[in-house]
Image: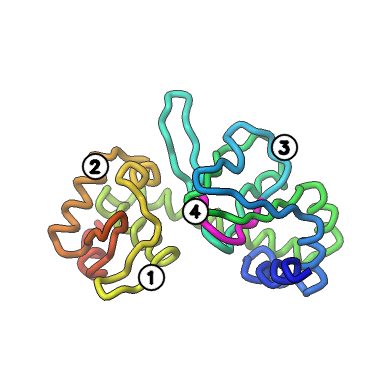
Amino acid sequence: MEKTLANVERLHEFRLFGDLSEAQAGDIVAMSAMRLHGRGEVIWRQGESADGFCALLSGMVRLESTSPRGQVKTWRILSEGDCFGEMALFDEKARRATATVMSDAAEVMFVDADRFWAYLRPRPTLLRNLLNHLSALVRQVDQEFSDVIFHNMNGRLVKLLMRLARRHGRDTAEGRLIEVALTHQEIANLLGATRETVSKCIGNFRRDGALAQIGPHLVITDGEKLASWIR
């Protein structure tokens, strides 16, 4: 019972569920399945059937796709308060990305698409929340395409690091530490670039005093210097 009440409270942290009443949040929790996954565990794979979506209650998850030629593209890095797999609400096509746990553990709430739509239809506030949520995702994708068109690789990498620092960072004595531990290859997968190019850019930022590395984590030591690389 206490766990259920805690999950009801946590739903209000999500854009999609933020305007729900306590009773409505309780209904969503009741229709959902709570699942706990460990580091490296696959929640679902690219190509599997899509019958619902997930709300990430804790932990971090990576969404990535692999092309027929073996090229990997990371679409999003998710943390507590994010939803993913929402396209299952609109069609029953296969998953376009694999969802993998990046943290020691991740707790997700799986919501069946058919049950959610049945609950949604007579509740226009929930429908508006869904449209606002999807609109925010479209704006994010639009911004990423704009970055590809208007900025060189240094600029694209800086904007990515700044987004990661805003969403997954914390202030330290050295600067803004990005708590997501990413290899240069994983950063390259986020940008659609090569590891060599990313390593060269990061080396430039470090020599400029804008960026440092503490263990597996990147630290923005001088935000103004880093921003000056956006061209």
The span shown in magenta is: 54-61
- Disc number for residue 92: 3
Screen quadrant of the C terminus: bottom left
Q: In x, y percent, where is residue 149?
A: 35, 47
Answer with mark 1 or mark 2, whichever residue precedes in sequence: 1
**Secondary structure of residue under mark 1:** strand
Name which residue type carries label 1. Answer: Arg
How far is the residue under mark 3 from the one under mark 1?
Answer: 39 Å
Point out the residue furthest to the left here: 207
Name which residue type carries label 2. Answer: Thr
| Residue 161 picture quarter | bottom left
At a point 37% along the width and 44% down the height, the residue shown is: 186
Q: Is residue 185 above or below residue 159?
A: above
| Residue 10 picture quarter | bottom right
How far is the residue under mark 2 from the one under mark 4?
Answer: 30 Å
Q: Which residue is mark 4?
A: 104
Instruction: Rate crowding at label 1 as few (under 14), some (14 to 19) or many (20 or more) other CA atoms within 10 Å.
Output: few
- Disc number for residue 197: 2
- Disc number for residue 211: none
Instruction: Rate crowding at label 3 as few (under 14), some (14 to 19) or many (20 or more) other CA atoms within 10 Å.
Output: few
Answer with mark 3 or mark 1, whichever residue precedes in sequence: 3
- Asked whether the viewer can see residue 10, the reply is yes
Q: Which residue is mark 1?
A: 170
**Secondary structure of residue under mark 3:** loop
Name which residue type carries label 3. Answer: Glu
Instruction: Say whether residue 12 is left or right of residue 141.
Output: right
Answer with mark 2 or mark 4, whichever residue precedes in sequence: 4
The number of discs equals: 4
At a point 69% along the width and 34% down the height, the residue shown is: 49
